[in-house]
Image (spheres, helix red, strand yellow):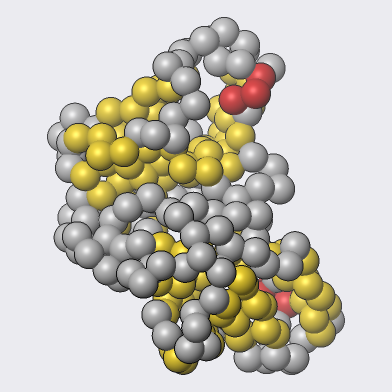
Amino acid sequence: GAGVSQTPSNKVTEKGKYVELRCDPISGHTALYWYRQSLGQGPEFLIYFQGTGAADDSGLPNDRFFAVRPEGSVSTLKIQRTERGDSAVYLCASSLGTSGGTPQETQYFGPGTRLLVL
Amino acid sequence: LAKTTQPISMDSYEGQEVNITCSHNNIATNDYITWYQQFPSQGPRFIIQGYKTKVTNEVASLFIPADRKSSTLSLPRVSLSDTAVYYCLVTSGGYQKVTFGTGTKLQVIP
Protein backbone atom coordinates (compact mmCIF):
# COMPACT_ATOMS: atom_id res chain seq x y z
CA GLY A 1 0.00 0.00 0.00
CA ALA A 2 0.94 3.65 -0.23
CA GLY A 3 3.30 4.94 2.39
CA VAL A 4 3.87 8.44 3.69
CA SER A 5 4.63 10.87 0.90
CA GLN A 6 6.22 14.28 1.12
CA THR A 7 6.44 17.07 -1.41
CA PRO A 8 8.56 18.59 -2.69
CA SER A 9 11.46 16.19 -2.36
CA ASN A 10 13.87 19.11 -2.59
CA LYS A 11 13.36 22.81 -2.02
CA VAL A 12 15.88 25.58 -2.56
CA THR A 13 14.93 29.02 -1.36
CA GLU A 14 16.53 32.31 -0.48
CA LYS A 15 16.97 33.68 2.99
CA GLY A 16 13.87 35.54 4.11
CA LYS A 17 11.44 33.66 1.87
CA TYR A 18 8.39 31.67 2.93
CA VAL A 19 8.17 27.91 2.31
CA GLU A 20 5.51 25.25 2.67
CA LEU A 21 6.28 21.56 3.00
CA ARG A 22 3.52 19.01 2.50
CA CYS A 23 2.96 15.60 4.05
CA ASP A 24 0.43 12.96 2.98
CA PRO A 25 0.16 10.35 5.74
CA ILE A 26 -0.89 6.73 5.38
CA SER A 27 -4.64 6.56 4.91
CA GLY A 28 -6.42 6.00 8.21
CA HIS A 29 -3.55 7.17 10.38
CA THR A 30 -4.78 9.82 12.77
CA ALA A 31 -1.42 10.67 14.36
CA LEU A 32 1.05 12.70 12.31
CA TYR A 33 4.51 13.89 13.31
CA TRP A 34 7.05 16.34 11.93
CA TYR A 35 10.78 16.01 12.56
CA ARG A 36 13.83 17.91 11.36
CA GLN A 37 17.14 16.19 10.67
CA SER A 38 20.44 17.97 10.28
CA LEU A 39 23.45 16.31 8.71
CA GLY A 40 24.94 13.64 10.96
CA GLN A 41 22.23 13.97 13.57
CA GLY A 42 19.16 11.97 14.45
CA PRO A 43 15.70 13.33 13.71
CA GLU A 44 14.59 16.10 16.04
CA PHE A 45 10.93 16.26 17.01
CA LEU A 46 9.01 19.37 15.98
CA ILE A 47 5.26 18.79 16.39
CA TYR A 48 2.65 16.09 16.35
CA PHE A 49 -1.04 16.03 15.54
CA GLN A 50 -3.80 13.77 16.71
CA GLY A 51 -6.53 14.38 14.17
CA THR A 52 -6.74 18.06 13.33
CA GLY A 53 -5.27 19.37 16.54
CA ALA A 54 -1.64 19.86 17.46
CA ALA A 55 -1.24 17.64 20.52
CA ASP A 56 2.37 18.65 21.18
CA ASP A 57 4.20 21.50 19.47
CA SER A 58 6.98 21.76 22.00
CA GLY A 59 9.65 21.05 19.41
CA LEU A 60 8.94 24.01 17.14
CA PRO A 61 12.08 26.16 17.43
CA ASN A 62 10.39 29.56 17.22
CA ASP A 63 7.32 31.36 15.93
CA ARG A 64 8.55 31.29 12.33
CA PHE A 65 7.53 27.64 12.23
CA PHE A 66 3.88 26.65 12.03
CA ALA A 67 2.05 23.50 10.99
CA VAL A 68 -1.56 22.75 10.14
CA ARG A 69 -3.68 19.70 9.47
CA PRO A 70 -7.12 21.16 8.74
CA GLU A 71 -8.94 17.98 7.75
CA GLY A 72 -7.02 15.50 9.83
CA SER A 73 -5.13 14.03 6.90
CA VAL A 74 -2.66 16.10 4.88
CA SER A 75 -0.40 18.38 6.88
CA THR A 76 1.61 21.42 5.87
CA LEU A 77 4.68 22.70 7.68
CA LYS A 78 5.13 26.41 7.09
CA ILE A 79 8.34 28.32 7.63
CA GLN A 80 8.34 32.11 7.47
CA ARG A 81 11.36 34.34 6.90
CA THR A 82 13.63 31.36 6.32
CA GLU A 83 17.17 31.47 7.65
CA ARG A 84 20.23 29.54 6.52
CA GLY A 85 20.08 27.56 9.77
CA ASP A 86 16.71 26.15 8.71
CA SER A 87 18.49 24.07 6.05
CA ALA A 88 17.83 20.43 6.91
CA VAL A 89 15.76 17.41 5.93
CA TYR A 90 12.20 17.71 7.17
CA LEU A 91 10.66 14.33 7.89
CA CYS A 92 7.03 13.49 8.34
CA ALA A 93 5.73 10.32 9.97
CA SER A 94 2.31 8.91 10.75
CA SER A 95 0.92 6.23 13.03
CA LEU A 96 -2.48 4.71 13.72
CA GLY A 97 -3.20 7.00 16.65
CA THR A 98 -5.39 4.46 18.40
CA SER A 99 -3.09 3.22 21.13
CA GLY A 100 -3.38 5.61 24.03
CA GLY A 101 -1.10 3.49 26.14
CA THR A 102 1.86 1.22 25.71
CA PRO A 103 3.51 0.04 23.59
CA GLN A 104 4.71 2.86 21.39
CA GLU A 105 2.97 2.84 18.05
CA THR A 106 5.17 2.25 15.04
CA GLN A 107 5.81 5.48 13.20
CA TYR A 108 6.02 5.26 9.41
CA PHE A 109 8.29 7.87 7.93
CA GLY A 110 8.25 9.55 4.57
CA PRO A 111 11.39 10.16 2.50
CA GLY A 112 11.69 13.74 3.69
CA THR A 113 11.97 17.15 2.06
CA ARG A 114 15.48 18.50 1.73
CA LEU A 115 15.35 22.24 2.35
CA LEU A 116 18.28 24.43 1.41
CA VAL A 117 18.20 28.09 2.33
CA LEU A 118 20.73 30.17 0.43
CA LEU B 1 12.39 10.74 28.67
CA ALA B 2 15.16 8.25 29.38
CA LYS B 3 18.46 9.09 27.70
CA THR B 4 20.13 6.44 25.57
CA THR B 5 23.80 5.87 24.85
CA GLN B 6 25.04 3.78 21.95
CA PRO B 7 28.30 3.54 20.00
CA ILE B 8 28.75 6.17 17.33
CA SER B 9 29.93 3.70 14.70
CA MET B 10 30.69 0.03 14.06
CA ASP B 11 32.25 -1.92 11.21
CA SER B 12 31.46 -5.51 10.35
CA TYR B 13 32.27 -7.95 7.57
CA GLU B 14 29.55 -9.45 5.46
CA GLY B 15 28.07 -12.62 6.89
CA GLN B 16 28.90 -11.81 10.49
CA GLU B 17 26.46 -11.32 13.33
CA VAL B 18 26.36 -7.74 14.57
CA ASN B 19 25.37 -6.75 18.08
CA ILE B 20 24.69 -3.11 18.92
CA THR B 21 24.26 -2.36 22.60
CA CYS B 22 22.33 0.60 23.94
CA SER B 23 22.40 1.86 27.52
CA HIS B 24 19.29 3.39 29.09
CA ASN B 25 19.96 3.55 32.81
CA ASN B 26 16.95 5.75 33.62
CA ILE B 27 14.33 3.66 31.85
CA ALA B 28 10.92 3.87 33.51
CA THR B 29 8.51 1.05 34.27
CA ASN B 30 6.19 1.87 31.37
CA ASP B 31 8.94 2.46 28.81
CA TYR B 32 9.54 0.22 25.82
CA ILE B 33 12.75 -0.10 23.82
CA THR B 34 12.41 0.49 20.11
CA TRP B 35 14.98 0.35 17.32
CA TYR B 36 14.79 2.13 14.00
CA GLN B 37 17.02 1.82 10.93
CA GLN B 38 17.79 4.66 8.55
CA PHE B 39 19.37 4.36 5.11
CA PRO B 40 20.91 7.41 3.45
CA SER B 41 18.33 9.72 1.91
CA GLN B 42 15.43 7.86 3.51
CA GLY B 43 13.30 8.26 6.61
CA PRO B 44 13.83 5.93 9.58
CA ARG B 45 12.17 2.51 9.46
CA PHE B 46 10.93 0.52 12.46
CA ILE B 47 12.93 -2.65 13.12
CA ILE B 48 11.89 -4.10 16.44
CA GLN B 49 10.41 -3.25 19.81
CA GLY B 50 10.53 -4.99 23.17
CA TYR B 51 9.86 -4.64 26.88
CA LYS B 52 11.89 -7.43 28.47
CA THR B 53 13.71 -10.70 27.73
CA LYS B 54 13.99 -11.49 24.04
CA VAL B 55 12.06 -10.49 20.97
CA THR B 56 12.74 -11.86 17.50
CA ASN B 57 11.32 -11.04 14.11
CA GLU B 58 12.35 -11.69 10.52
CA VAL B 59 14.89 -8.88 10.60
CA ALA B 60 16.53 -8.87 14.02
CA SER B 61 16.52 -9.95 17.63
CA LEU B 62 16.36 -7.73 20.67
CA PHE B 63 17.81 -8.85 23.98
CA ILE B 64 16.80 -7.03 27.16
CA PRO B 65 18.23 -8.10 30.54
CA ALA B 66 16.11 -8.27 33.66
CA ASP B 67 17.13 -4.82 34.93
CA ARG B 68 16.25 -3.30 31.50
CA LYS B 69 19.07 -0.77 31.81
CA SER B 70 20.49 -1.83 28.48
CA SER B 71 19.44 -3.65 25.36
CA THR B 72 21.21 -5.32 22.44
CA LEU B 73 20.07 -5.32 18.86
CA SER B 74 21.34 -8.39 17.05
CA LEU B 75 21.49 -8.55 13.25
CA PRO B 76 22.26 -12.07 11.98
CA ARG B 77 24.59 -12.52 9.02
CA VAL B 78 24.70 -8.92 7.84
CA SER B 79 24.96 -8.01 4.20
CA LEU B 80 26.12 -4.84 2.48
CA SER B 81 22.53 -3.66 2.37
CA ASP B 82 22.46 -3.51 6.18
CA THR B 83 24.80 -0.52 6.08
CA ALA B 84 22.73 2.14 7.80
CA VAL B 85 22.31 4.15 10.98
CA TYR B 86 20.56 2.31 13.82
CA TYR B 87 18.70 4.28 16.49
CA CYS B 88 17.83 3.01 19.95
CA LEU B 89 14.82 4.74 21.48
CA VAL B 90 13.15 4.52 24.84
CA THR B 91 9.49 5.31 24.41
CA SER B 92 6.70 5.72 26.91
CA GLY B 93 3.97 4.52 24.68
CA GLY B 94 1.05 5.35 22.51
CA TYR B 95 1.35 7.97 19.86
CA GLN B 96 3.61 10.37 21.67
CA LYS B 97 6.71 11.96 20.24
CA VAL B 98 9.92 9.99 20.26
CA THR B 99 13.43 11.24 20.84
CA PHE B 100 16.20 10.07 18.55
CA GLY B 101 19.85 10.24 19.54
CA THR B 102 22.70 10.28 17.06
CA GLY B 103 22.45 6.55 16.44
CA THR B 104 25.07 3.96 15.52
CA LYS B 105 26.42 4.08 12.00
CA LEU B 106 26.98 0.49 10.88
CA GLN B 107 29.31 -0.04 7.95
CA VAL B 108 29.28 -3.54 6.45
CA ILE B 109 32.48 -4.37 4.62
CA PRO B 110 32.68 -6.92 1.78
Vertical placement of A106 versus A15: above or below? below
Vertical placement of B90 versus B47: above or below? above
Q: Residue drawn at (67%, 67%), measured in percent from left and top?
A: B6
How many numbered marks, from 0 up? 0
Q: Which is nearer the eye, B4 or A24?
A: B4
Which x, y percent locates residue A2? 32, 58
Q: Is residue B38 left or right of residue A71?
A: right
Q: Which is nearer the eye, B33 or A35?
A: B33
Q: Is residue A92 left or right of residue A74?
A: right
Residue B30 showing in the rendered view: yes
Vertical placement of A51 versus B11: above or below? above
Q: Residue drawn at (81%, 75%), measured in percent from left and top?
A: B11
Q: Residue drawn at (63%, 91%), measured in percent from left and top?
A: B76
Which x, y percent locates residue B79? 70, 82
Q: Which is nearer the eye, A8 or B53?
A: B53
Quarter of the rendering occupied by the N terminus of chain A: bottom left
Q: Which is nearer the eye, B109 or A35?
A: A35
Residue B58 showing in the rendered view: no
Which x, y percent locates residue A115? 58, 30
Where is residue B50, by image quadrant? bottom left
Q: Is residue B12 left or right of residue B2?
A: right
Quarter of the rendering occupied by the C terminus of chain A: top right
Q: Is residue A66 left or right of residue B33?
A: left
Which x, y percent locates residue A27? 22, 54
Q: Residue drawn at (17%, 42%), measured in percent from left and top?
A: A51
